[in-house]
Image: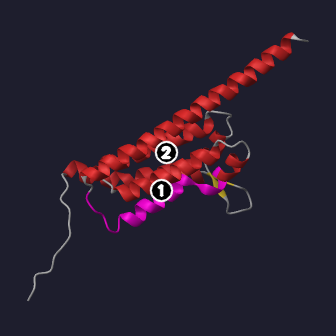
Amino acid sequence: MKAKEVAWEVLPPEDKQRRAALEPLFKWLAVIMDDFLRVPGTNFRFGLDPLIGLLPGLGDTASAIISALGLVYAARTGLPKVLLARMAANILINELVGVIPGVGDAFSFWFKSNRRNYELLRRYRATPTRARKSDWFFLALVLGLLFIIVCAGLIVSFAVLWAIGHALSSSGRSV
């Protein structure tokens, strides 16, 4: 009779506590950022993400930073790179489309990247695996790309705000 192999992971108690705290954190992010408010008379819900995104320039970047903080915490608990990459992709898609005026705001009402990340985490918890060094390297690359995109969004936002301020100040002088 062959011995059956059992896959299991050994985590220190503090890692188990941090990993257990992931689901409530991502649920909180999903509720606050994507499902906090309901349109009266409908089942359509939205959160602070599309509302913050209405702020010209900085809104979408601020939402991406909030979501990325959850991703960093998830990485510290040892989630596999495939899951982290999918979560990062959701954040990146929301950020990239979100910077387009009008279209990006409507997209944020529909896409709900934090809700998607929470659902990914819930599905993962059924079959957890331990992270490897290559997972950390991959995560560093993904977070580096996210950082570059967020910085580019900030630069473009400040440039647009500066141009608007310059246009308003020069039109005020000519009157």
Q: Is residue 116 visible?
A: yes
Q: Residue 116, relative to residue 153: is it above or below?
A: below
Separation of marks 1 and 2 at Cα, in angstroms: 9 Å
Q: Is residue 77 visible?
A: no
What is the three-letter code of the residue carrying label 2? Ser
Q: Quarter-wise, where is residue 2 in the image?
A: bottom left
State the colouring used for the structure image: secondary structure
Query: What label sits on residue 67 in the rendered view?
Result: 2
> Crowding at label 2, few (<14), some or many (≥20) Cα neighbours within 10 Å?
many
Q: Which residue is mark 1?
A: 117
Q: Position of residue 126 (x, y in %)?
A: 35, 68
- The quadrant of the picture occupied by the N terminus is bottom left
Q: Position of residue 24 (x, y in %)?
A: 41, 53
Q: Disc 1 on helix, strand or loop?
A: helix
The reply to whether the C-beta atoms of the residues labelled 1 and 2 are less than 8 Å apart is yes
Label located before the other in sequence (1 or 2): 2
Instruction: Write the residue at 30% across / 48% down.
Output: 136
Assess whether residue 21 is covered by the magenta stretch: no
Residue 33 placement, left or right of 6: right
Q: Which residues, given as a range, are shown in magenta? A: 108-130
Assess whether residue 117 is covered by the magenta stretch: yes
Query: What label sits on residue 175 in the rendered view?
Result: none
What is the three-letter code of the residue carrying label 1? Asn
- The quadrant of the picture occupied by the C terminus is top right
Q: Residue furthest right?
A: 175
